[in-house]
Image (cartoon, rainbow, N blue to C red):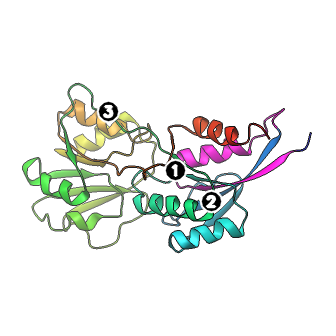
């Protein structure tokens, strides 16, 4: 039986993107489709964990550049598996897919859900989150990543424990300590950070997933408020898969008839 080769471009940088590439690259006996996977990384992390298959690093030059790359490299399917807060890239992917006439799927892990005892405060942006802090606490555990720290730079009365994969660049809060780390993080370690640094408020994006969720449990146990920045919506009309397995099934279904 002839095998159909399908080129899938995964806009990655997340654990789900890496797992999707692994699942697509794995042979599936009896299935007349083989996937050539290219994962694109933004290049913002110094030492990313590389997925199987081809990897490219760097931007495309907006939706026009992405559409051109898709056409030039014979991409058959585009999967947006970027971070839930990479709104610009998601918009570019939707426009590029429409320009290049290729199917697009968004892979998004589910967001977090508040539990009994949580003291969550929703914010629509980092700037809104910063505006809430003076009324909630003075010692802030800031886990929104190194991008966007400028939103908190004017809060001179607050002290920040900033955790990120790579060192942040200014503008940054005047009073802060930087903690470099990459998830997953465990509950014991998060409890100790909150205790040792006398944290009285946590700020996080609603990234979802298990890798960084223990901080929410630790905050609940400590009785401290959590400012949760809402994630932007997926572009209208783009189908969404919640897990890598679901995404694989969606892609395979496109070619179920060969």
Q: Nearer the viewer, mark 2 or mark 3?
A: 2
Q: How far apart are marks 2 and 1 (CA)?
A: 25 Å
Quarter of the image for residue 201 reads top left
Mark yes or no: residue 198 visible. no
Residue 161 versus residue 110 in the image, above or below? below
Measured as percent of width and height from the top left, residue 98 is found at 56, 60
Nearer to me, 105 or 49: 105
What residue sits right under mark 2 in the picture? Answer: 101
Bounds of the magenta segment: 3-31
The mark found on residue 14 in the picture is 1
At which x and y percent is residue 88?
42, 63
Q: Report helix, strand or loop for mark 2.
A: loop
Q: In this view, does 106 lie to the left or right of 102?
A: left
The residue shown at (80%, 41%) is: 258
- Res 97 → quadrant: bottom right
Location of residue 75 in the rendering, given as x and y in whole percent from the top left corner: 69, 59
Q: How crowded is mark 3: few (under 14 residues within 10 Å), some or many (20 or more)?
A: few
Element carrying mark 3: loop
Disc number for residue 113? 3
Left or right of 47 in this view: 140:
left
Residues marked 2 and 3 touching at CB (< 8 Å): no
Q: Indicate the quadrant containing the N terminus: top left, top right, bottom left or bottom right.
A: top right
Asked if residue 8 lies in the magenta stretch, the reply is: yes
Q: Gap between marks 2 and 3, in whole Å?
A: 36 Å
């Amino acid at each position: 039986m002839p095998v159909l080769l399908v080129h899938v471009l995964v806009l990655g940088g997340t654990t789900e993107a890496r797992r999707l590439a692994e699942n697509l690259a794995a042979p599936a006996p009896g299935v007349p489709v083989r996937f050539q996977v290219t994962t694109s990384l933004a290049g913002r992390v110094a030492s990313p964990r590389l997925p199987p298959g081809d990897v490219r690093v760097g931007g495309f030059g907006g939706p026009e550049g992405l559409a051109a790359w898709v056409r030039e490299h014979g991409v058959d399917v585009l999967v947006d598996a970027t971070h839930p807060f990479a709104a610009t890239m998601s918009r570019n992917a939707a426009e590029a897919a429409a320009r290049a006439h290729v199917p697009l799927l968004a892979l998004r892990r589910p967001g977090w859900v508040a539990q009994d005892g949580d003291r969550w405060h929703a914010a629509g942006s980092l700037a809104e989150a910063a505006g809430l802090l003076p009324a909630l606490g003075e010692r802030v555990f800031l886990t929104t990543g190194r991008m966007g720290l400028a939103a908190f730079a004017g809060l001179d009365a607050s002290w920040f424990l900033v955790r990120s994969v790579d060192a942040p660049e200014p503008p940054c809060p005047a009073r802060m300590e930087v903690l470099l780390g990459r998830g997953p993080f465990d509950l014991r370690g998060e409890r100790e950070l909150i205790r040792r640094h006398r944290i009285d408020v946590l700020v996080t994006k609603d990234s979802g997933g298990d890798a960084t969720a223990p901080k929410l449990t630790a905050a609940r146990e400590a009785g401290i408020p959590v400012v949760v920045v809402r994630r932007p919506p997926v572009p209208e009309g783009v189908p969404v898969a919640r897990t890598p397995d679901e995404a694989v099934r969606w892609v395979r279904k496109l070619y179920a008839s060969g």
